[in-house]
Amino acid sequence: MRKDYYDSLEIDNPDLRERDLFGRLPNLIALALSGAGWARQLNGIDPNSVTSREALGQIPVLHAEDWPALRGEYPPFGGFVVPQRRRTRRLLMSPGPVFHPDVDGTDVGGAARALFAAGMRAGDVGLNCFSYHLSPFGFLMDSGAHALGCTVIAAGSDDAVTVADVMQKLAPSAFVGPADFLKRLLDVSDSPSEMSIKHALIANSPLTPALRRGFASAGIDVQECLTHPDIGIIAYESDARDGMIVNEGLIVEIVRPGSGEPVADGEVGEIVVTAFNPDYPMIRLATGQLSAVMRGRSPCGRTNMRIKGVLGPAPA
């Protein structure tokens, strides 16, 4: 098992990490309040009072399924982008339709540490098979790979035969994309056991035990991550493959669906995320996905909260 880490945050004292995040939270809330959408959502909240999980739990949950209605009055982002920073460089979209800003910056969605945990290193060539067409995920992973010092083949996922041909010619060592598209690449490859890809980071389609075994038989070490178009990487697997580690720059809560009330460790609830993006902050965003906190630390040595991955959709 590898014992190297993307940065010291991954092995920090968890109490110090928690203290730092909640020390920064009042400034994030104050910044968010400058946007009309957040001013409506956080009406009456004193930023300086939100310095603990208990205080954060008093803020109303923002439900992802409400995005189209919330943004419709002030398109495209409903006043949830910090107006004075003006760093949006692309307008992207996910089903709904819901529009997302791609803001200027380095690894804004926190993909670099998930890619690092999956085995990618500076100088590697990665095949990015997340879509670059409207979807945020191609650019999200692209930004993280560049932050690591990797070269990216911007393949997308439209034509497995063409991508397999490119893969044979350029010999990337890593794959980033949906599990089902990696399976299609193996299916159309002349020699799947001789593929150049040795590491893969998978998201946004089910990674079944059968698929994982099939990838392993082709010599591909596969790890999974949990993503959200408004946040980036929420959590990621390490080589311990014992749950998912919460991305160290986020506050994640597991709450009772429909109430926003945190549940006990080990109890299944909805994943709610607070993200420290100064251009596009997220405060208690309910993702619509269920998980549970895992007790103890990961055998890989990372010290942050672990969750069990996605255990299904949250009830409406």
Image: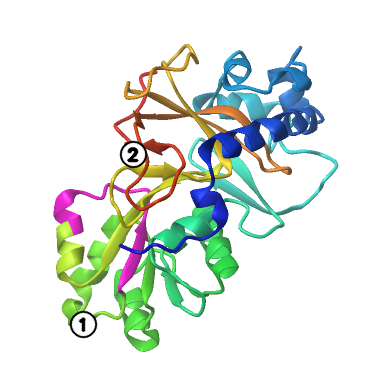
Query: On the rendered structure, is 16 left or right of 82?
Result: left
Does residue 209 belong to the magenta stretch? yes
Answer whether residue 133 is visible to the viewer in this image: no
Q: Nearer the viewer, residue 205 or 251?
A: 251
Query: On the rendered structure, is 141 left or right of 191?
Result: right
Alpha carbon distance from label 1 to label 2:
31 Å
Question: What residue did someone put label 2 on?
Answer: 309
Instruction: Estimate the x, y position of residue 314 in percent, counting from the top left.
Output: 37, 24
Q: Quadrant of residue 282?
A: top right
Disc 1 on helix, strand or loop? Answer: helix
Which circle's residue, 1 or 2, is located before the other in the chain? 1
Q: Amino acid at mark 1?
A: Glu
Question: What residue did someone put label 1 on?
Answer: 194
Q: The C terminus is located in which quarter? A: top left
Q: Which residue appears at 18% of the width and 69% of the height? A: 187
Q: Which residue appears at 74% of the width and 28% of the height? A: 26
Q: Is residue 45 above or below residue 66?
A: above
* Segment colored magenta: 198-212
Q: Residues within 10 Å of mark 2 (few under 14, many from 20)?
A: many
Q: Amino acid at mark 2?
A: Gly
Q: Quadrant of residue 295?
A: top left
